[in-house]
Every structure is written in structure tokens, then in C-alpha cells.
Image: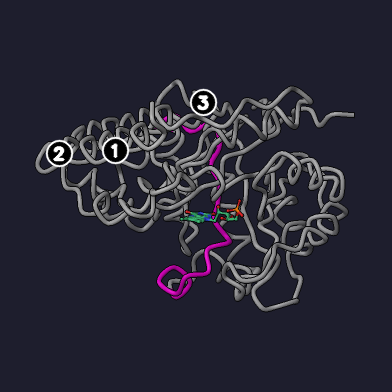
């Protein structure tokens, strides 16, 4: 049987394919492109610092913007103070989030040293208090994204998520690694299978899904309700489309052509400039182009000669420069192929 959709409270998630929250990646412009081309059933914002929202940081407040096209959308928040998290969750709901997700997976020191992110895996009382406060603060479903535990092989997630479920969490995502691992090694999908027995709410598996075969294998081996894709979707919304079709048993669309990739890369830049300019037009173009430095080269990754223009692309400071580099590259490819 093909994996179907599922519900998170009143929110229908179909297809059971989710775009992962990714800092500096899953911004509003990226999500709209991912939705149009890849059509995942649910997407998440990059994580939003509850403390920064509390202090009214403009750069962070803009991450709460939601466009009707991209719904259902989850806004992910992180923090270590229950009341501050509750206050931010209310703002997410007001902004139009369909779901508020709590980050308990981020392992980087700048986040963990404030008692947020994966540090909560070591402090179950505080973690439960945060879940309780956020669930009470909003009417939309509250979900949690966790890792398997803090230390290598100390699988604390089952006890924790059972508690979260008692506090009213409506979905759990497991990135199948331990916090101390960072991104090392392979994700261990047996952890997802084991967590399946601990929770009744929808369980989302995450870690190392790149193609539809991986997604189908994850469904089959773990019994998860949905599959979340992160890195494979960066600058590659077509990967989501292929995985979605593979899950549904439909023919997968072909790889995008180079002109298609370039067209979408340029759209991403234009939309990011507009997004940056929305609240503050000063230097919006250069801020937008710089913010995409890591992502632009990935649009043409794998094309012969792409590595050679990487430095030129990352040095760009304006839309017209990015366009010139990419269109030059396209022309050189056409010349090489003799067309
Ligand atoms: C650039 C980047 C930024 C990330 N930012 C977040 C984040 O803000 N919140 C979060 O829960 N996970 C974050 N993650 C982790 C992903 O959501 C996901 O759990 C992880 O990449 C594993 O999935 P994958 O193998 O499909 O990439 C980030 C990952 C990457 C690569």
C-alpha cells in the first residue's frame, strides 16, 4: 500500500512529504518555489529565536511572514524560557502559522548554551514546561522536532516524547542522529522504528533521504507517517517533486534542464531581493544576493564546468551580476555542445 496523508490536529498533510526547517535556507521565497515545484504536504520555516522576537529584533520578526500560497506552514521556534516561547508562539499563530514547531534538535553551541535546541534533550523538566506553555498559548497544533538524544547512543527520545504527547504535542519529527553527532555518520533509521512504538501521534522520519527510493525504504522499514527532506531540497525543488511522485507510485519527472535551473535560481534571487526590501529597502539587493551565496552554486551542481564558476557566483553583489554569470555559463554550455 502507498503511504497516504495524515492529520495534525485539523491540518491535513498530504502528500506525506515534508520540507525540513533549515536556517538561512527555508525562507519565504525558497518555500514558495519549493511549494510550486515540489508540492510537499507541509513545510517549515527556518528556526526563529524566541528571545530575539521578545526583544523585537527586526531581522528575526521578518521570519514570521507567511504567504497564503505556502500553507500549510509550520513556523519553528527555539528558546529555553517557557513564557518567552509561549509569547513567540502566539505571534506565530497571529502571523498565520498553521503549526508551531519547537526545535529540540539544534546542537550548535550558540543555541545549546542558552538551554535551547538539543540542550533540552538533557533537561526533560524544562522541555516539558516549554511544551506545556506553548500548547496552552495557541489554538493551532504544536509539534516537536527532536534528535534521538544528547549523547551518542543514549536514546532518551522515547521517554521524552511520551511526556510531550501527554502535554498535548500533535506530531513528532525525529532526525535520526544524536545531538553530539552533528551531521556525522549515517542517520540510523532503526531509531525511528523504535520511536514508533513510543508515540501515537504522527511520527515523521528525517535524515539522509535524497531520492524517492530512500523515502519508500524509510516508510517501509520504520512505520513512520511522513518523511522529511532537508539538504536534498536545497536549490533543488525538483528533488521534492521526484520524491513526491515516487511515494505516490507515479512516474517521476525528469531532471530539470540547465535553462530551467538557471531560471529558478534567478527567480530565487529576485524574490529574495523583494523579501529583503519589504521591511528595509536599504541595500536589500546586496543583502539578498549575499544571503544566497551558499545556495546559488548548488542550482548548477553536477553540470560540467559548474565548479569553475563557483567563485564568480559567490563574489556577486547584485542581481545583474548573478544573471550575467549564469547566462554566460549557459552560453558556454551551448557552445560546448555545438548547438
Ligand atoms: C543548512 C541547514 C540548516 C538547518 N537548520 C535547521 C533549523 O533551523 N531547525 C531544525 O530543526 N533543523 C535544522 N536543520 C536540520 C534539518 O532540518 C534536518 O533535520 C537535517 O538536515 C537532516 O535531514 P536531511 O538529511 O534530509 O538533510 C538544518 C540543516 C541544514 C543542512
Considering the numbered disc 3 on the image, is that residue within a helix, a strand or a loop? Answer: helix
Does the residue tagged 2 have its C-beta within 8 Å of any atom of ligand 1? no
Q: Tell me which numbered mark, 3 or 1, is placed earlier along the sequence.
A: 3
Quarter of the view holding residue 326: top left
Measure how far apart labels 2 and 1 are at the Cα level.
27 Å
Residue 10, visible in the rendered structure: no
What residue appears at the point 73 percent right and 57 percent down from the top-left corner?
A: 161
Q: Which residue is mark 2?
A: 280
Crowd band around label 1 with a 10 angstrom C-alpha radius: few (<14), some (14–19), many (20+): many
In-image side of 326 versus 187 (left or right)? left
Q: Tell me which numbered mark, 2 or 3, is placed earlier along the sequence.
A: 3
Q: Which residue is mark 1?
A: 326
Q: Which residue is mark 3?
A: 37
Residues drawn in magenta: 94-113
Residue 172, visible in the rendered structure: yes
The one nearer the camera, 199 or 258, is 258
Please identify, in this view, whether the residue under mark 3 or under mark 1 is nearer the observer. 1
Crowd band around label 3 with a 10 angstrom C-alpha radius: few (<14), some (14–19), many (20+): some
The one nearer the camera, 267 or 92, is 267
Residue 101 percent coordinates (x, y): 55, 46
Considering the numbered disc 2 on the image, is that residue within a helix, a strand or a loop? Answer: loop
In-image side of 57 versus 198 (left or right)? left
Residue 141 percent coordinates (x, y): 61, 37
Please identify, in this view, whether the residue under mark 2 or under mark 3 is nearer the observer. 3
Q: Is residue 103 magenta?
A: yes
Q: Is residue 294 magenta?
A: no
Considering the numbered disc 1 on the image, is that residue within a helix, a strand or a loop? Answer: helix
Q: From the viewer's perspective, is residue 7 above or below residue 300?
A: above
Amino acid at each position: 500500500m502507498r503511504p497516504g496523508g495524515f492529520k495534525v490536529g485539523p491540518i491535513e498533510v498530504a502528500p506525506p512529504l515534508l520540507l525540513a526547517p533549515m536556517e538561512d535556507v527555508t525562507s519565504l521565497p525558497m518555500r514558495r518555489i519549493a511549494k510550486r515545484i515540489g508540492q510537499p504536504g507541509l513545510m517549515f520555516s527556518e528556526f526563529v529565536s524566541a528571545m530575539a522576537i521578545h526583544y523585537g529584533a527586526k531581522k528575526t520578526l521578518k521570519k514570521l511572514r507567511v504567504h497564503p500560497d505556502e500553507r500549510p506552514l509550520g513556523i519553528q521556534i527555539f528558546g529555553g524560557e517557557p513564557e518567552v516561547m509561549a509569547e513567540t508562539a502566539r505571534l506565530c499563530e497571529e502571523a498565520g502559522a498553521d503549526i508551531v514547531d519547537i526545535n529540540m534538535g539544534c546542537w550548535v553551541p550558540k543555541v545549546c548554551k542558552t538551554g535551547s535546541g538539543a540542550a533540552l534533550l538533557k533537561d526533560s523538566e524544562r522541555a516539558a514546561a516549554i511544551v506545556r506553555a506553548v500548547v496552552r498559548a495557541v489554538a493551532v497544533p504544536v509539534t516537536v522536532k527532536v534528535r534521538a538524544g544528547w549523547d551518542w547512543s543514549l536514546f532518551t527520545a522515547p521517554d521524552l516524547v511520551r511526556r510531550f504527547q501527554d502535554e498535548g504535542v500533535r506530531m513528532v519529527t525525529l532526525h535520526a542522529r544524536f545531538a553530539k553527532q552533528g551531521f556525522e555518520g549515517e542517520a540510523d533509521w532503526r531509531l525511528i522504528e523504535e520511536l514508533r512504538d513510543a508515540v501515537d501521534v504522527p511520527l515523521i522520519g528525517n535524515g539522509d533521504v535524497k531520492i524517492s527510493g530512500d523515502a519508500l525504504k524509510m516508510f517501509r522499514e520504520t512505520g513512520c507517517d511522513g518523511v522529511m527532506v532537508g539538504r536534498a531540497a536545497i536549490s533543488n525543488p525538483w528533488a521534492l517533486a521526484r520524491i513526491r511522485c515516487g511515494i505516490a507510485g507515479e512516474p517521476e519527472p525528469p531532471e530539470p534542464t540547465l535553462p530551467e535551473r538557471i531560471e529558478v535560481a534567478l527567480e530565487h534571487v529576485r524574490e529574495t531581493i523583494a523579501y529583503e526590501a519589504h521591511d528595509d529597502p536599504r541595500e536589500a539587493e546586496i543583502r539578498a544576493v549575499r544571503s544566497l551565496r551558499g545556495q546559488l552554486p548548488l542550482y548548477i551542481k553536477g553540470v560540467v564546468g559548474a565548479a569553475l564558476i563557483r567563485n564568480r557566483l559567490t563574489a556577486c553583489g547584485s542581481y545583474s551580476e548573478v544573471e550575467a554569470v549564469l547566462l554566460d555559463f549557459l552560453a558556454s554550455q551551448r557552445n560546448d555542445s555545438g548547438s
